Image: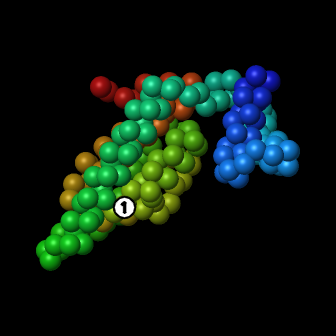
Amino acid sequence: MTAVRLSGAGLWLVTLWLLLWNGLSVGNVVAGCLVASLVLIAARLPRAACAGGDEDRARIAPISLLYFLGYVLVKLVQSNLVLAWEIVTPRNRINTGIIAVPMRTDSELALLVVANVITLTPGTVTIEAVGSPPVVYVNVLHLHDIEEVRQELMRIEELSVRAFGSRTARAQLAGTVTS
């Protein structure tokens, strides 16, 4: 991370700290600087972790990230409405099942994001995420069409890789996506 980006992140963290404490004092500024420093040191990933070099570093695409966040928000609202409807109606349409969804990239970040978005969404929970070969096992509350669920989860993978995937993950996805 460059010095400019580090100082910008540090300034942002100090500002958040001051907003959380709702006051500007020397003590709050000093404490904010200490906390920001600790967070930046703890969050910094060593370059050696990227064995493939620059090709394996995550890259954020702001427009794709906004689209991904909007998509996930819409899906969260939809699933909450479906689950709420299931609760308030006397009819039981629950048909649970566990499915395996093979991922198209071997990006650990994509696997992590997909697994967490699945678990965040009401009516689905990630049971296991295996990295080699990358597969996510999901328990679905309303399982009526297995292929539809698989396509939905692969769509989440695609959007997450486009939002903050590495060049390698994007290349893997481009090699298998047929749009």
Q: Is residue 135 above or below residue 2?
A: below
- Badge 1 crowding class, 10 Å Cα cut-off, few under 14, some 14 to 19, many 20 or more, is many
Residue positioned 47% across, 47% down in the render = 114
In this rendering, would 43 be left or right of 114?
A: right
Please identify the quarter of the rendering in which residue 94 is found.
bottom left
The x, y position of residue 2, in whole percent, is 77, 23
Position of 44 with respect to 55 (left or right) is right
Q: Amino acid at mark 1?
A: Pro
* Image quadrant containing the N terminus: top right
Please report the residue visible at 37 percent of the width from the left and 29 percent of the height from the top. Answer: 177
Most foreground residue, 17 or 136: 17
Rendering quarter of residue 14:
top right
Q: Farthest left residue?
A: 91
Query: How are the colours assigned in the image?
Result: rainbow
Q: Looking at the image, which is closer to me, 31 or 76?
A: 31
Residue depicted at 85% across the width and 44% down the height: 26
Q: Residue 97: which quarter of the image? A: bottom left
Question: Quadrant of the image for the C terminus?
Answer: top left
Which residue occupies 52% across, 41% down?
Answer: 110
x and y percentages locating residue 103 in the rendered image:
45, 43
179, 117: nearer the viewer: 117
- Asked if residue 96 is positioned above or below residue 6 in the image, the reply reads below
User: What residue would you read off at disc 1?
Assistant: 122
Question: In the structure shown, which secondary structural element does the residue marked by tag 1 occupy?
Answer: loop
| Residue 80 visible, this orientation | yes
Residue 158 in view here: no
